Amino acid sequence: MRIMKNLQNFLYDQEYFIDIFQNCLHVYYYEELLSLSDTLIELKLKEFILVIEGEDLSISSMDKHEMLMKGKINNMRFKR
């Protein structure tokens, strides 16, 4: 599994990566979880804050630098 992650990091070579699919949001390389509720999630990334607004939001899985969120996403924005 670690080999796959290292390969992904090499191929993507980005400071962050956001993937949206089927009412899920996958964020790679976040630094800190700032806020969490069923309608709002805020994540600190290297140069900005990612704000996700929606309904029934929840964290499905979480790692040191990776997070998978589920729910109905109504709005997503970057805040400096």
Image (cartoon, rainbow, N blue to C red):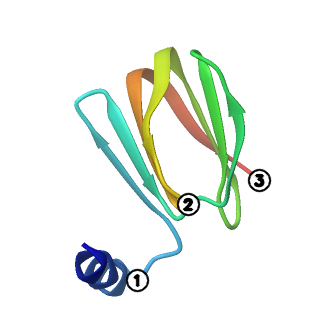
Disc 2/disc 3 C-alpha distance (Å):
22 Å
Report the amino acid beneath label 3. Arg
| Quadrant of the rendered image containing residue 9 | bottom left
- The residue singled out by tag 1 in the image is 13
Q: Relative to 20, is 4 on the left or the right?
A: left
| Quadrant of the rendered image containing residue 37 | top right
Disc 2/disc 1 C-alpha distance (Å):
18 Å
As helix, strand or loop, the secondary structure at mark 1 comes to loop
Nearest to viewer (mark 2 / mark 1): 2
Which residue is depicted at the point 62% across and 31% down? 41
Report the amino acid beneath label 1. Asp
- The residue singled out by tag 3 in the image is 80
Q: Could you tell me if the residues under marks 2 and 1 are in contact, i.e. CB atoms within 8 Å?
A: no
- The residue singled out by tag 2 in the image is 64
| Quadrant of the rendered image containing residue 22 | top left
Q: Earlier in the sequence, mark 2 or mark 3?
A: 2
As helix, strand or loop, the secondary structure at mark 3 comes to loop
Residue 3, above or below 49: below
Q: Earlier in the sequence, mark 2 or mark 1?
A: 1
Which residue is depicted at the point 23% across and 77% down? 4
User: Residue 64: x percent and y percent?
Assistant: 55, 60
As helix, strand or loop, the secondary structure at mark 2 comes to loop
Which residue is depicted at the point 51% across and 27% down? 75
